[in-house]
Structure formats: structure tokens, C-alpha cells
Image: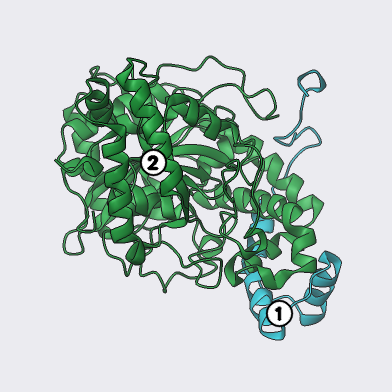
Amino acid sequence: MSEAISKEAFQALIDRAGLTLTPPQFDELRIAYGYLQAMRERVRKPRGYDAEPAHIFKPAER
Amino acid sequence: MDPTLLTIADAAKLISKKKLSPVELVSACIAKTEKLEPTLNAYVTFTPDLALKAAKVAESEVMAGKVRSPMHGIPVGLKDIYDTAGTRTTGHSRLLKDRIPTEDAFTVAKLRESGAVITGKLGTFEFAIGGPSFDILSPPARNPWDPTRMTGGSSSGSGAAVAAGMVLGATGSDTGGSIRSPSSLCGLAGIKPTYGLLSRRGILPLSQTLDHAGPMCWTVEDAAIMLQGMAGYDALDPAAANVVVKDYTGQIGASVKGKTIGIIRHFYEEDHVAAPSVVAAMETAIDVFKSLGCIVKEITLPPLMDFAATGLIIMSSEAFSIHEKDLQATPELYGEIGRDRIMMGGLLTGGDYVQAMRQRRELCVAVADAMLGVDCLFTASSPFPAPEIDKVPKWLMYQKPSITMPFNVTGQPAMTVCAGYEEGSGLPLAFQLVGNAFDEPTLFQLGAAYEAVTSWRSVRPSLA
């Protein structure tokens, strides 16, 4: 699990998402955010410009 | 004979021969539900009157010689995220407690066309993610093998209802394992078919690119029969694959000698270390396949956590996009677990989502490469038997990688098959068979061959 995000930085994320948390919920989600951070790092690997995402679509099929 | 404990295959034979009446069968399931529901909480909305009415129609058609399919007259429950015209569909959430759709989900309409009798709406983790929860529309489903245990989720009521014989089949949905987890913990056969095979239209979404519909039944053959009743191209589902619907029961009974099975051992022995009882059951199951003449080969895939991270970031992002307004305006209407899990998606960025989607493509290629030369993959389904219902960590799926999520990420068909029962607790254990895209028939062939030479299907929970 990654290092805990600061309260200020976490509050900024909550504000950006437009959410309102109770104080206990804020504390719990701030801790749980560490798990999410680890996953964010896990999907970041060295990739070239040509690394396409899985949801590229063909216009004729839409 | 207790008709509620018949397989769909056997009940269908009796119905077609007019030796079992749909009304008799549905009435027995209703009586069993009335007896067990106070303990198991399988239903959100039970509709016995509608079921009896449909059973009477089915009976008159059968008596007139018009048997629509093997699903004709078979009692089936629907996870309460499948829309039903005139019957509320709530997602097991207070947010939608009075929501009454005007149309059936595409797959529900297909089941009705096949002659299935809908008995009502089954419990789910709230919006297919939040549970087991005690603070939502009604209490969570309990496991018929031991009601102090959870059923797994999110198709929790479906797991309980089928295992207990309240219905002979149920629909589930699977975004990260929500068909396969309750099928594992309740001792069922449940399949997440290939992405795009079954329509998602009219099913409350959790994550549009990972959501799959599918059947949950007592046996593999029943799952094949029920999948046949749900399949068909839906031009109004943008993800629907315009493919020929195969004969899902046609290969059942054929020899599996020479089939090659790739064993993904590191998923349950290293990446998410499973309980010793699960590891032992996997070895026994592999030996059974060898005894059937299958060729077994070790396969290494990318680490399970790569799949879990990819799937969870995609799921969380897509789920938040669906629930954003309601979470901002009325968070108090959600249960705590569902609310908090979905809120996590709001903390991700567009960059996170696209990186996960890039990794998804890489993982799909890696698994496709690993499948060259094998007919299917084999791994554990759940790393543990059913835990106590009030001791499930809220953030478990973030802490320990799910063994089912990889095949939501790749979209391949994946089926859970009961692999026996844990010594002492008697709780079910299970493995997964994973196929190439649209090759569900091979999974049914192998799963049914396994069931035919093991005795697990003759054991029912005491609450059945």
C-alpha cells in the first residue's frame, strides 16, 4: 500500500469529485485511497506512443 | 420426488412427457420459498401470483403439444438489476425502491419467449457492487450451506435461491466475478459468457465495458440450457456481437479425451494464496481431467494484480460516471459499502482510466498468446470457501486480487464448476474453466464431463 495521501490533498480530490463526506468516512476513504494509489501505479508501465487503449472503435460499427 | 431439486434438464424431460406439470413445479418452488425466505433473504420482490399465472399458461401450451424449449415451465429468478415490465427493479437500493420499468430487459424477454416462468427479483449487492450490506433496501442473502455465511456476490440472491431449490435457475451479472463468486460459494455452475454474447440492454449497469449477463444453475448442463434461452443478437446493445448462437448442449456427453487444459496455478498458489482446502480441491480436479484423457499443461499469465488493477480502475471509473449525480445529491440513499466503493472512482483521473485501458489491451494479447495450443484454461474460482457474512472486509477486492476479474478484463467466457466440499465445514469449493471467445460449448463439454464422473451434484445443502 502506498504512503498515505495528506488530508489536504485528499480533500482536494473529494472537492474535485463534488462529493461530501462525513469525518469518519473521510478518514476511512483516505486510508483506502492508498490501495487505489497502488493500482494507479500498477497500470503505469513504460509504453510507446503507439500503445492503443482497448476501447478504440471503428466508426462504421457504431 | 421433490421437484424443486430436479435439474432443469430432468424437469424439462418430465414436462415434455407430461409427467410433471409446470404448475406443480412452480407451486413447489413457491412453497419452498415461503418456508426458507425468512432465513435466506434471497428475494427483493417475490411474485408468486405472476409466477402461477405464467405456469398455468405454460401448462396449457404443453398440454396442447406446444413445448417451446427446455426452459418451458421452468421457474427462474432474476437478479434485481434485470428490468421487468410492471415489476419493480431496484438494484437492491433505496435509491430505486419504487422504480417500475415499462419494458423487460432483452434477456428477460428472451427467457419469457423460451417459456421460463419468472418467480421474482432476487437480491444483489447494491447496484452489483455494495455488499453484503445490512443498510440497504432489504437484508442480504444468506448461504443455504450455512446461513451464518455469505453467498458471495454480487448475484447473492441468485446463489442462495438456486442452491436451496427455490428456483431451478437464476440470472446473474458479472463485472469482476459476480456470477462466479456466488456460484463458487453456493456450489453452483455459473457462466460469464463471452462479452457481447448476451445483451446488457435493460440491465442496470455497473461498468459498461466489463458487465456480462449470464445464468446460474445447479449443473453445467442446466447452465447451457439456460444460456440458450437467454442468447440472441440485440441490435440495440452497442456491445452486442452479431454472431450465430451456437448449440450449447450439443457437445455435452462427447468425449473430452485429447482436450488440452492450461493450468494457471500461480493465480491461486502465489498471486492470491488460496486456502489449503481450495488448493487441494484444484489438484483433485486436475487429476479428474487427466483421468478423462485430457492433456494438462502449465500456463503462466501476467501477475493477477495486473488484471485486478486494470479491472478495478476501469470498473470504478465507469461506475462513478453512472452514479456521480446521485452520489453528489443523495449519498444517504446508498448503503455504506456501495456508496464508498463507487465514490472511489471519483478520485481517479482520465489518465488513470486510459492507462488501464491500454493495459487491458496488453493483457488481452498476453492471454490470447497463452491460449495458443490449449482448448481452455483452468484455475481456482474463489480463493476461500464462504466467509462469515458479517466479517467480509469492505476493501478486500483492493487488498487481494480477484481470481475472476482477469476474464472480465479479457471478455473470454469463464465458468465456475463445483469442485467438492471442504472437509469439516462442508462448504462448496470451485474451479473456473476459461475458453476462447464464443467457445462456450467446449466449456460446457468439459464441465459436464467432470460433473458426470464426480458425485458433487448429488449433495444439496441442508436448507434445500
Chain letter corresponding to the colour cyan: A
Look at label 2 and name its amino acid.
Leu
Indicate left or right for B214 with B321 as reference.
Answer: left
Residue visible at 69% across and 64% down in the picture: B344
Q: Nearer the viewer, residue B231 or B96?
A: B96
For mark 2, what is the residue? B52
Residue visible at 56% across and 43% down in the picture: B82
Residue visible at 46% across and 48% down in the picture: B120
For mark 1, what is the residue? A26
- Of circles 2 and 1, the one toward us is 2
Chain ID, mark 1: A
Classify 10 Å Cα crowding around label 2: few (below 14), some (14-19), many (20 and above): many
Above or below: residue B351 compared with residue B455: below
Image quadrant assignment for residue B297: top left
Chain letter corresponding to the colour green: B
Q: Secondary structure at mark 2?
A: helix
Classify 10 Å Cα crowding around label 1: few (below 14), some (14-19), many (20 and above): some
